[in-house]
Amino acid sequence: MMISPPRSNRAPPAGNIETSGWRCVKQFLTSSVRTLPRLLERNTPFQELPELIQKAPFLRDVFHWVEKTPYTHLKTASLAKHLHITQRTLSRKIVTTTGYNSAQLMRLIKLNQISELLISTNKPVYRISDEMGFADDTSLRRSFKRITNMTPGEYRRSFA
């Protein structure tokens, strides 16, 4: 019967096969930039939004306007005026490029913004609702659940 020597908490001696592993761990612990682990794939209705921005340059302007506009002020007429095109042209361009109508796309962009806040902060839903311009947190919860089939709290627990 062979008894193995007790293991120490020290790094193995130089030249050992395990040395490179210790070097990687040491480098990670001493590096100033760390990346938090994230799920590689999230099955959310928002995962296709980055691809949509790449489809047409005008969509970048749409995303930017929607993200800075309070939810209660999201209207196709306001967006068309901001982009200096007619509502009909805007609606046609959005549907042909994305497959969503303009109201659906604006709602999806705003709820994506909310999903990012849910994942990256610990702010309560009512505060996020106020910041994003919802009339109240009940309407945010209802809209969020309609799109994701999850409440904001369930979403935060699943993806944070």
Image (cartoon, rainbow, N blue to C red):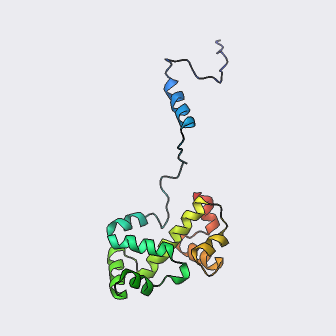
- The number of callouts visible is 0
Q: Residue 143 placed where, x, y %?
A: 56, 77
Q: Residue 145 placed where, x, y %?
A: 58, 73
In this rendering, position of residue 50 left or right of residue 121: left
Q: Give the residue at the far top of this rendering.
A: 1
In which quadrant of the rendered view does residue 123 lie?
Answer: bottom right
Q: Which residue is drawn at 63% across and 59% down?
A: 157
Q: In this view, does 111 lie above or below 34?
A: below
Q: Residue 87 placed where, x, y %?
A: 37, 87
The residue closer to the viewer here, 73 or 51, is 73
Q: Is residue 146 above or below residue 87?
A: above
Q: Residue at x 52, y 33 (%)?
A: 27
In which quadrant of the rendered view does residue 140 lie?
Answer: bottom right
Q: Is residue 2 above or below residue 90?
A: above
Give the quadrant of the C terminus.
bottom right
- Is residue 94 at least partly visible in the picture? yes
- Is residue 48 at least partly visible in the picture? no
Q: Is residue 146 above or below residue 16?
A: below
Give the quadrant of the N terminus.
top right
Q: Which residue is drawn at 45% across and 63% down?
A: 47
Q: Which residue is drawn at 52% across and 68% down?
A: 113
The residue closer to the viewer here, 124 or 154, is 124
Q: Residue 17 placed where, x, y %?
A: 49, 21
